[in-house]
Image: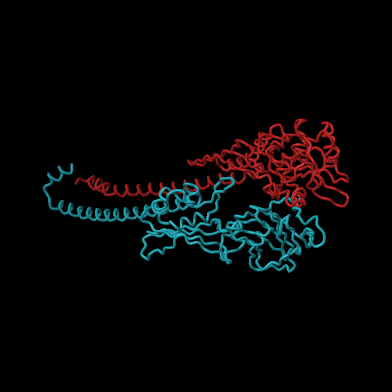
Amino acid sequence: MDNNGYVMTGMSFLLILPIIVLFMVLINLNYADTESKSQFIQSESISNVVHDFELNIPCLGRQVLKEEAFTVVNSKKPLFDSRKSTRDNLQLKIDQITQSYNNKGWHVNCTVQSISESDDPFQVEVTSLVMVQKGKVAHKQVIHQKIPINDPNDPLPDPMPFVKCKDYGGISIDSSRIYYGHSLASYLEQRGKKNWEIYENASSPLFIKKCPYDPFVGHGVPNTMETLKNCLDNGFYHESNDGACYLCRLEGKSTCFHQGLEIFILPPPINNQTNSAPCSVDHVVFGDDNDDIYPGGCIQYHQEGNLIFLLYLDDSHRKKYGLPPI
Amino acid sequence: MLGKDFLENKGGQVLSMDLLLALVIISVFLGVSANALDLVSSKMDESSYVYSLERITTDNANILLSTPGTPEDWEEGHQSLSMVKPGLAEVDSVTGTVNKTLSMKKISKLGENYHELMDGKVLPFGLNSSMIISPRDSSLESVTINNQEHPEDAKDILIINRTIMCDYMIANILTSIVSNQPSGTSSDLYKPLFCPHCNLTQNFKHPREESENNKPGWKCKPFIVTQNDINTTDIYIMTDPPQIMDESACWIIDSTQNISDSPMIFKSSPYRLNEKLSELMGDKDNATIWVHVFSSGNTDEAFNVYIGSFLKNTSLEKVKPQYLSPQPCNFIFKVWI
């Protein structure tokens, strides 16, 4: 050994080397574990963000539909393209949520891809794409959801009659019914329909409510018409192949190719019976073409003193609701 | 350099002592280092094992709780269990989205085939586990999916405790009449339904209850019942709380075809409706039935009414409104080796 002590230094280094390696392995292990835990937390928070959108989209979608419906009701101007308009308005609301996430350091993007009618006319379908990224973890998900339009606690109004009667005089709303005054009679008169005056001061429900009397043939049982009367009192809407879906109703259409809805428009009670008048179903009364408005035979569903409560229905609607044929 | 100095050194003795001393020190160093190395590496093994055990258990418990499994309806038994990866989350039948609620059907199926579905699929082979779902409401029954006590000499034990919602799925709600207006209800737009009694006279008439003015009256709601419901389930009417203070409270079940004026008094235990409903339905496949509830309108005596269909022969102790909706529960998953 020389006086410079190189041997001992070399030996010491060799002795310390495994300890250094061990420390490095330990640190690496700890880092990997922390990394995995942090990724897990990030992944968890990302799924929470996606879940937040999943919860928010139907609520906001409903809110947009309601705002649009009341805009049409108040302005009496139909939406040009209800699907696009609903999508754009929903996107604006969702962007506010996205913005608040992005301000907190997230990379969130939610695009409403489409708003469309559903197989069930009491629902509207929404498809959206949610992309969330935080750090190295990213998630992309397409969400298909259905927005119910018949929530009894917060119902949506039917905007179609307001658009149809815009040029024929006023429509008034009282509580939960639409009162047509002279407008509907005038609408039918201008189309040259017989017995249009039956619909002077007619009324129909304002809000969409689903009929519980399903199957519909039960409306005719018992033949004393209690079921039909209760359905008319409550203003229940029925599923229909001919009636317009809710999105088309926002465009002021009474019929469309989608699975839709129909409702009875009730003439006021009268003293003397008229046997035939335009059929009391909304997609017939508000038919887009003149030929779409066809007559129906009268059905008495109630009487109070001299006042007779009548409904006019053609044979196919009578069959649908289990009512006696003409 | 070391070799040359060592060979050329003539003194030898002192150097030998130095070398001996150095060797002693080196031996001590080596010994201590080897011991430390052994200690640290065994600690590392242990900690990495515990971490990986924890990670495997936590991750798989999360997957179990947040996914419906593969295939989504594995609990129906359409596929052999060897092809199934279990998950307990319920899938919304209408929207098709996965809820943050556990399905009791899936839980029961997992309990019946616990080891077949867990070993090698959720947990690595060789690990033992127990799984219990304990409801927050102590009046509800705990669900033991696998009850196995861990031995006293177990090397490592991991316990995962999560709060989850659990759908007991022994009952379906047909309708409910609640005393308070539901949250989110727009008071301007919400209008109660007209019941078939609204056009009738005398005792048959049902004036509406006005709880805001403390005025007594009726609350009425329709619901649909099928012959299948009557044949395969027990349908009960019940109140929450079970013992109501409103002495004037009563109820009627009828339909537009069989309007009734025979009110019944609420009892503290649920009342079975199958016979009454069967009478109202006759031979029809399904019918719309109305439930009418009379109350004093006094908010201090307010109560909720539920009509629910329970699995046939469900014991009366289990016929409670709590079983009609998902309940908060603790999911306790214990893993040991």
Supply the letter of whichever chain is red. A
> Residue B264, relative to residue A290: is it above or below?
below
> Residue B13, relative to residue A195: is it above or below?
below
- In front: A83, or A20? A83
- In front: B54, or A317? A317
> Residue B155, relative to residue A51: is it above or below?
below
Residue shown at 68%/61% (left/top)? B304
**Location of residue A54 in the rendering, given as x and y in whole percent from the top left corner:** 59, 45
**Location of residue A200 in the rendering, given as x and y in whole percent from the top left corner:** 85, 40
Quarter of the rendering containing residue A284: top right
Left or right: B177 in relation to A196 = left
Kindly tell me whether residue B6 is visible in this rendering: yes
Residue shown at 62%/55% (left/top)? B227
**Location of residue B291 in the rendering, given as x and y in whole percent from the top left corner:** 70, 58
Is the N terminus of chain B in the top left, top right, bottom left or bottom right quadrant?
top left
- In front: B107, or B18? B107
Supply the letter of whichever chain is cyan. B
**Location of residue A8 in the rendering, given as x and y in whole percent from the top left corner:** 24, 48
Counting the numbered discs, the total is 0
Quarter of the rendering containing residue A89: top right
Kindly tell me whether residue A74 is visible in this rendering: no
